[in-house]
Image (cartoon, grey):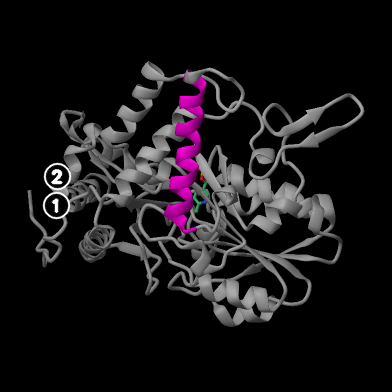
């Protein structure tokens, strides 16, 4: 196996110790060590998360908020404890500004349907960007169809950065909300969300930030960003699938109607009239993913127990090493070369379909994602149908970058 020369600087971050916390990383695929480089899709889970969920089911499984017995009180305390941890994790002013959802998609749909249907009217505009994941496009398209509002889209340049002059031009008195990703899942671009919020607020618009790709990599402070809404997924930050968070400013959440009806979101029900529970409970209809939320709390604790600046430096080192090595392969075109990037390397190899690259890499134990990454407009912008995407997490290593590069060499040999 060839070793790519790396100028290793991130010795402060003990990645070997971190890896021991993730049992799945010891797995073998096709008789080779698993090299998991599909972290933008979903991350693996540390033992603390697995243990917390197991402990819940073994020790205090009960429904929450409703019962008067101790078991249910324990379940409720754990569920609500996660809400408080999440409040601190994103620096929200109040724990009631944290709505627990099924995922980032769920949170964006909540805002589009609840806030959007109440606040949008014909002639109004919703401003998106070309970098958005389908989850931050389709809900807005749907609510525009329902209300007569219009979608406008901020273009990107060849590096994959938002063209801020165009943002300034498109933002106007008709813009009611700007919906923008913090980090692009297709290209890794980190957007200047605080600047976007400042400008949007000056124009009288609200801002939803899609933080699905941010929370595992960057410290997120919703008050520093001054986002009106900030949505993210638990499973992309080492927590369980089926969990997510919508942060919303209290006064906005208070004024919004419920998104879904059902148990737990009501104060009283008769056939004549229903009154709703307070914020955030009016947005949490039905029995939630209690075990998942308990696991998400463990994921937050796990992340907060790490030196996150060192983890970020380690990830940056992986991205820089992988980018340099992959770019050096003849016929490779890297998509997305923003000055501010996080953990995503998207590329195509001339004459080889990305799916074929993915298949050969899989035989080498290397898991990457190939396709349009739920970001078809980004693919259209670059004139490609699909890319191969390696995405890194704090538990990846420089040896895994080597494994990726070697496997790509094999793919080239076999497929060209
Ligand atoms: C930028 C971005 N937004 C939203 C989502 C949707 O997240 P989920 O499928 O967890 O709801 C994703 C998932 O890949 C994403 O990358």
- Horizontally, residue 8 falls left or right of residue 193, namely left
Q: Is residue 292 above or below residue 393?
A: above
Q: Which mark is residue 17?
A: 2
Q: Main secondary structure of the magenta part?
A: helix
Residue 47 placed where, x, y %? 26, 33
**Could you tell me if the residues under marks 2 and 1 are in contact, i.e. CB atoms within 8 Å?**
yes
Q: Residue at x 77, y 55 (%)?
A: 144
Q: Is residue 83 magenta?
A: yes
Q: Which mark is residue 14?
A: 1
Label 2 crowd (10 A; few <14 / some 14-19 / many >=20): few
Q: Residue at x 30, y 52 (%)?
A: 392
Q: Which stretch did the figure color magenta?
A: 71-91
- Horizontally, residue 402 falls left or right of residue 196, namely left
Helix, strand or loop at label 1? It is loop
Residue 215 visible: yes
Q: Is residue 65 above or below residue 298?
A: above
Instruction: Give whichever of 359, 267 is nearer the camera.
Output: 267
Instruction: Give whichever of 9, 98 is nearer the camera.
Output: 98
Residue 33 placed where, x, y %? 16, 35
């Amino acid at each position: 196996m060839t070793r790519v020369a790396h100028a290793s600087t991130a010795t402060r971050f003990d990645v070997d110790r971190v890896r021991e916390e993730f049992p799945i990383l010891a797995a073998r695929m096709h008789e080779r060590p698993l090299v998991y480089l599909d972290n933008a899709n979903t991350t693996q889970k540390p033992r603390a998360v697995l243990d917390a969920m197991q402990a819940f089911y073994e020790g205090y499984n009960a429904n929450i908020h409703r019962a008067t017995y101790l078991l249910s009180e324990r379940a409720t305390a754990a569920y609500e404890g996660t809400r408080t941890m999440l409040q601190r994790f994103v620096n929200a002013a109040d724990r009631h500004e944290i709505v627990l959802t099924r995922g980032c998609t769920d949170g964006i749909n909540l805002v589009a349907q609840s806030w959007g249907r109440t606040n949008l009217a014909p002639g109004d505009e919703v401003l998106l960007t070309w970098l958005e994941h389908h989850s931050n496009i389709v809900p807005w398209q749907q609510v525009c169809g329902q209300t007569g509002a219009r979608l406008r889209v901020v273009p990107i340049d060849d590096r994959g950065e938002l063209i801020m002059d165009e943002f300034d031009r498109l933002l106007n008195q008709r813009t009611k909300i700007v919906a923008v990703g913090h980090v692009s899942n297709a290209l890794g671009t980190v957007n200047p969300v605080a600047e976007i919020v400042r400008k949007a607020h000056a124009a009288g618009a609200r801002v939803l930030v899609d933080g699905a790709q941010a929370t595992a990599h960057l410290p997120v402070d919703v008050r520093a960003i001054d986002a009106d809404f900030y949505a993210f997924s638990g499973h992309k930050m080492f927590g369980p699938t089926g969990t997510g968070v919508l942060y919303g400013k209290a006064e906005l959440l208070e004024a919004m109607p419920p998104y879904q009806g059902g148990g737990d979101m009501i104060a009283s029900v008769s056939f004549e009239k229903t009154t709703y529970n307070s914020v955030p409970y009016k947005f949490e209809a039905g029995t939630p993913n209690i075990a998942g939320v308990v696991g998400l709390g463990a994921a937050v604790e796990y992340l907060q127990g790490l030196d996150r600046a060192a983890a970020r430096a380690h990830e940056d080192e992986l991205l820089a090493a992988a980018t340099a090595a992959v770019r050096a392969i003849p016929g490779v075109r890297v998509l997305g070369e923003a000055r501010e990037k996080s953990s995503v390397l998207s590329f195509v190899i001339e004459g080889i379909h990305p799916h074929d690259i993915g298949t050969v890499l899989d035989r080498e134990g290397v898991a990457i994602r190939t396709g349009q990454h739920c970001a078809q407009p980004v693919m259209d912008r670059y004139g490609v149908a699909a890319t191969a995407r390696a995405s890194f997490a704090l538990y990846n290593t420089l040896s895994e970058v080597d494994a990726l590069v070697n496997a790509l060499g094999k793919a080239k040999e076999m497929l060209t």
